[in-house]
Image (spheres, rainbow, N blue to C red):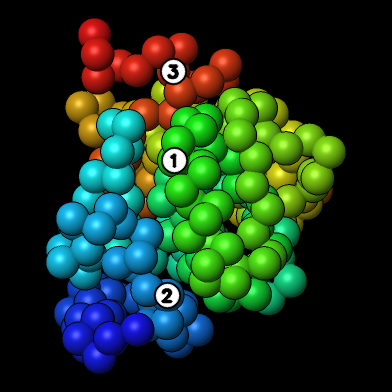
């Protein structure tokens, strides 16, 4: 791993994350360690540490580093957590979660992206990331319940199966459509039910599936 990329990662952490209020030291260290450029197509690796999302093919993106950080910080990940991620994409979010000590179960609906993510994660030795191709809005029932569920795509509403698969005291983080944009929500489950916390505005690709968008709203 080249020195130039290490320097760029440090600049990303200092200028994009810490200055915007990301304070969790374990999370910041994970961002310093995970080589984000390796999760991008080769022709885009020079822009891996810029302050924004990047295309990864098939109409999908790798999220802005800050948005990946705020979603992960909102989930309050601790070592040993079982995490369900909906939308593997490049695999970068999965790697960050694994660095934090989580056991990660991640679902992707696009086979080309999943194959590339699997290969990248394998090369980087993230052995606690388990992958599956399928409809993420159905969750991963046989591995439930999960301490954390992260949905890395914008949904019209929270998929019911994912709420059912969230453990008591678990946290679900999801971008929900609200007006002309999306808002990040954290849902906490207790013995009494579910409690929603509204976060900041965001922009994600749409969540396609039985309990999400039936077809890509961007093509209407």
Residues at discs 3 and 1 in contact (Cβ within 8 Å): no
Find out whether the residues at labels 3 and 2 contact each other: C-beta distance under 8 Å.
Answer: no
Cα distance between the residues tagged 3 and 1 = 19 Å
Mark 1 Cα shell of 10 Å, populated few (<14), some (14-19), many (≥20):
many
Coordinates of residue 55 in the picture (x, y in percent): 24, 45
Which SS class for mark 2? loop
Query: Horizontal and vertical percent for residue 135?
Result: 59, 26
Tell me if I can see residue 192 in this picture: no
The crowding category of the residue bearing disc 3, from other C-alpha atoms within 10 Å (few below 14, some 14 to 19, many at least 20), is: some
At numbered mark 1, what does the secondary structure look like: helix, strand or loop?
A: helix
3 or 2: tag closer to the N-terminus: 2
User: Residue at point 52% right, 20% down?
Assistant: 209
118 left or right of 163? left
Outermost residue on the top side: it is 220
- Label 3 element class: loop
From the image, state whether disc 3 or disc 1 is nearer to you.
1
Q: How many marks?
A: 3
* Residue at the disc numbered 2: 34
Placement of 209 over or under 80, stated as above or below: above
Which numbered disc flags the more N-terminal residue, 3 or 1? 1
Q: Which mark is residue 32?
A: none
Give the number of the disc on residue 213. 3
Q: Quadrant of the N terminus?
A: bottom left
1 versus 220 height, above or below: below
Q: Which mark is residue 113?
A: 1
Q: Quadrant of residue 69?
A: bottom left
Q: Nearer the viewer, residue 119 or 32?
A: 119
Q: Residue at x 80, y 44 (%)?
A: 144
Q: Residues within 10 Å of mark 2 (few under 14, many from 20)?
A: some
């Amino acid at each position: 791993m080249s020195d130039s990329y290490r320097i760029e990662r440090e600049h990303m952490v200092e200028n994009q994350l810490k200055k915007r209020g990301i304070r969790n030291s374990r999370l910041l260290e994970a961002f310093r360690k995970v080589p984000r450029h390796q999760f991008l197509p080769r022709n885009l690796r020079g822009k891996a540490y810029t302050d924004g999302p990047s295309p990864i093919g098939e109409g999908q993106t790798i999220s802005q580093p800050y948005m990946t950080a705020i979603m992960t910080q909102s989930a309050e990940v601790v070592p040993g957590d079982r995490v369900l991620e909906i939308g593997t994409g490049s695999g970068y979010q999965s790697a960050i979660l694994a660095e934090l000590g989580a056991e990660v179960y991640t679902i992707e609906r696009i086979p080309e992206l999943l194959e590339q993510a699997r290969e990248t994660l394998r090369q980087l030795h993230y052995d606690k990331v388990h992958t599956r191709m399928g409809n993420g809005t159905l969750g991963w029932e046989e591995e439930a319940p999960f301490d954390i569920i992260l949905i890395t795509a914008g949904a019209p509403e929270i998929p019911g199966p994912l709420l059912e698969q969230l453990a008591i005291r678990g946290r679900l983080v999801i971008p929900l459509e609200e007006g002309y944009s999306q808002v990040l929500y954290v849902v906490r489950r207790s013995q009494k039910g579910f409690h929603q916390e509204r976060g900041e505005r965001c922009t994600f690709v749409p969540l396609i599936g039985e309990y999400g968008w039936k077809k890509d709203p961007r093509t209407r």
